[in-house]
Image (cartoon, rainbow, N blue to C red):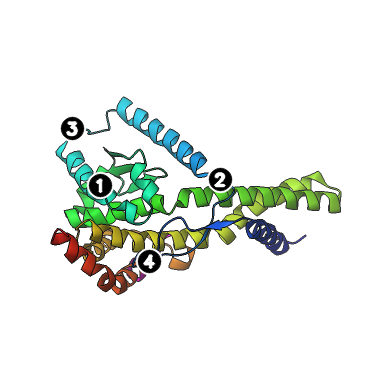
């Protein structure tokens, strides 16, 4: 069986499994209109939050052992103050998120990064603060983006898709093993299909998730009283970091320019929310 046919069968198996999964709308659409229904049925919300909490606690323990957490620093207080203002607005998109066990920490690392895991576990790396030197509004854009990943349950969605791939590959391997009378062919199918399925399924949806986080995060920061125009200057700073980048169609993130263009089209929609928040209404 050719590699191209194997890849096609992997995609067909996975698509069939996805078609059998119920979809859900994890958040309210907001004024930015994020209304894509997601396949999350193979992993429960509790399971995703539990796995994320375990991973987060392990990260904290390792960071504490290496003295990499700056819990009492001015940087951490600043990050937590901004995060708290954003968290206060998450009920607009999903009320249950107000009851999450939110945790916000800053870790010493040269990496320019931040994340928010399922259930509201936030980490900001000092590399982001030191190298990008974001204003409060720009930092709110980063954290609004990351919080939006958690609100949209993108981790849970990825976990569900990973299970789809696993089930699809096991089913395909069984078919090939029986039809060819070779267990080696079945094993090779799993090995080959794993990478092909990742490209065929995970990549496009990862880019979709990034755009959703951009859009929802923009509204979140505006509602919290942070200037949405700062999202543009943030990504301009990110783009100025340089370094080799893959073409957009092979990347899990949108290109800097397409991301900025998308944000600019949405700013007029969220600017009234920002102005309202600044007036204290």
Which comes sooner in the sequence, label 1 or label 4?
1
In the picture, the disc for residue 83 is: 1
Q: CA distance from mark 1 to mark 4?
A: 26 Å
Q: Is residue 35 at all visible to an observer of this figure?
A: yes
Question: Is 14 placed left or right of 91 in the picture?
Answer: right
From the image, tell me which residue sits under label 3. 72
Q: Nearer the viewer, mark 3 or mark 2?
A: 2
Could you say whether the residue bearing mark 3 is in a helix, strand or loop?
Answer: loop
Q: Residue 265, image x and y in percent?
A: 31, 74
Give the residue drawn at x 29%, y 51%: 143
Which comes sooner in the sequence, label 2 or label 1?
2
Give the residue drawn at x 33%, y 40%: 102
Q: How many numbered badges does the structure rendering display?
A: 4
Question: Is 108 placed left or right of 184 in the picture?
Answer: left
Which residue is at the front of the view, 3 or 72? 72
From the image, tell me which residue sits under label 2. 43
**Is 114 above or below relative to 268?**
above
Q: Residue 202, image x and y in percent?
A: 54, 57
Which comes sooner in the sequence, label 3 or label 2?
2
Q: Nearer the viewer, mark 3 or mark 1?
A: 1
From the image, tell me which residue sits under label 4. 255
Indicate yes or no whether the magenta region holds residue 170: no
Q: Nearer the viewer, mark 1 or mark 4?
A: 1
State which quarter of the image contains the N terminus. Answer: bottom right
Q: Nearer the viewer, mark 4 or mark 2?
A: 2
State which quarter of the image contains the C terminus. Answer: bottom left
Which comes sooner in the sequence, label 4 or label 2?
2
Label 2 crowd (10 A; few <14 / some 14-19 / many >=20): some
Q: Which residues are magenta?
A: 253-258
Q: CA distance from mark 3 to mark 1?
A: 16 Å
């Amino acid at each position: 069986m050719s590699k191209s046919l194997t890849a096609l069968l992997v995609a067909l198996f996975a698509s069939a499994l996805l078609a059998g999964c119920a979809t859900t709308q994890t958040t309210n659409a907001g004024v930015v209109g994020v209304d894509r229904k997601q396949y999350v049925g193979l992993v429960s919300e509790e399971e995703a939050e539990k796995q994320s909490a375990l991973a987060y606690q392990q990260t904290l323990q390792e960071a504490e052992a290496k003295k990499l957490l700056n819990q009492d620093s001015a940087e951490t207080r600043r990050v937590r103050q901004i995060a708290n203002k954003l968290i206060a607005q998450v009920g607009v998109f999903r009320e249950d998120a107000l009851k999450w066990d939110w945790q916000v920490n800053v870790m010493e690392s040269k990496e320019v990064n931040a994340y928010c895991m399922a259930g509201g576990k936030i980490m900001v790396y000092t590399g982001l603060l030191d190298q990008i030197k974001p204003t409060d509004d720009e930092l709110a854009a980063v954290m609004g983006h990351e919080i939006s990943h958690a609100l949209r349950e993108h981790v849970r969605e990825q976990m569900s898709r990973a299970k789809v791939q696993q089930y699809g590959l096991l089913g395909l391997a069984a078919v090939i093993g029986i039809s060819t009378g070779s267990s080696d062919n079945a094993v090779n199918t799993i090995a080959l299909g794993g990478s092909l399925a990742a490209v065929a399924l995970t990549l496009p949806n990862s880019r979709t998730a990034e755009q959703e986080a951009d859009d929802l995060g923009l509204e979140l920061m505006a509602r919290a009283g942070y200037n949405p125009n700062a999202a543009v200057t943030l990504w301009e700073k990110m783009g100025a970091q340089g370094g080799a980048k893959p073409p957009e169609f092979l990347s899990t993130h949108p290109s800097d320019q397409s991301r900025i263009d998308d944000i600019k089209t949405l700013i007029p929609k969220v600017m009234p929310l920002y102005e309202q928040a600044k007036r204290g209404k």
